[in-house]
Image (spheres, rainbow, N blue to C red):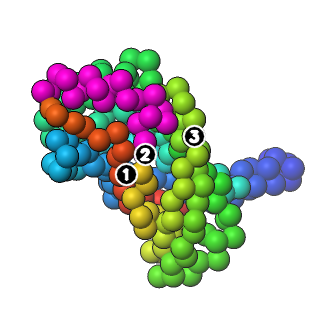
Amino acid sequence: MNKFIASVLLLISVQCQAAWQLNSDHSILSFMSTKNGDIMEVHEFDRFTASIDTQGKAKLDIDLSSVNTGIEVRDKRMRDLLFNTTEFSKATIIVDINNTYIDGLKIGQTQELDLDAELQLHGQTDTINTPVSVTRTAKDKLLVVNLLPVIIDADDYELLSGVAKLQEIAGLKSISGKVPVNFILSFTR
């Protein structure tokens, strides 16, 4: 093997090692719904992927068909009536993180960051803001946790008609169009 090819392979290897991948077994993405004014329930998405590339660009893809409310008929209604997963199968969040913050963390050290992210949901794109805590838990492990819930407004993503359909079919007085979202994301390099 010539030196040029060996150098290219080494560079690719180093870049691949520097990228962070989500450990989904140790990650949670949850949201809360509020119905009839004061009944709150916690739900999750079971399938999502995420990575942080060598330039610090983080991307989270959420499989909307994996919504898990604990009630199968409600999951189906949310997939069909709210998210319309046949047309909009996923939500995507993209954010630039300065790798200097990540690379400079020592094991056990935490850095708080205020992040603006782009959320693509239901054919709409908007900016969301969230303060997060980034902790290096091991040489090759990061934990990213939101410090405050991210409030998603259904109106910003043209989801209010879906909320109204869910309210009608369930015979509810109300379902809030504002949804708090929380996450714990574990990354491995």
Mark 1 residue crowding within 10 angstroms, few (<14) / some (14–19) / many (20+): some
Q: Is residue 132 above or below residue 59?
A: below
Q: Name the side, left or right, on which 149 lies relative to 2.
A: left
- Give the number of the disc on residue 126: 3
Q: Amino acid at mark 1?
A: Val
Q: Name the side, left or right, on which 49 lies relative to 125.
A: left
Q: Which residue is mark 1?
A: 181
Mark 2 residue crowding within 10 angstroms, few (<14) / some (14–19) / many (20+): some
Q: Is residue 100 above or below residue 84?
A: below
For image coordinates 42% across by 26% down, the residue present is 89
Q: Is residue 38 above or below residue 47?
A: below
- Give the number of the disc on residue 152: 2
Horizontal and vertical percent position of residue 19: 60, 55
Residue 56, image quadrant = bottom right
Q: Secondary structure at mark 2?
A: strand
For image coordinates 58% across by 60% down, the residue present is 115
Q: Name the side, left or right, on which 57 lies relative to 149.
A: right
Q: Nearer the viewer, residue 145 or 127?
A: 127
| Residues at marks 3 and 2, CA–CA distance in whole angstroms | 10 Å
Q: Secondary structure at mark 1?
A: strand
Horizontal and vertical percent position of residue 107: 51, 80
Q: Amino acid at mark 3?
A: Asp
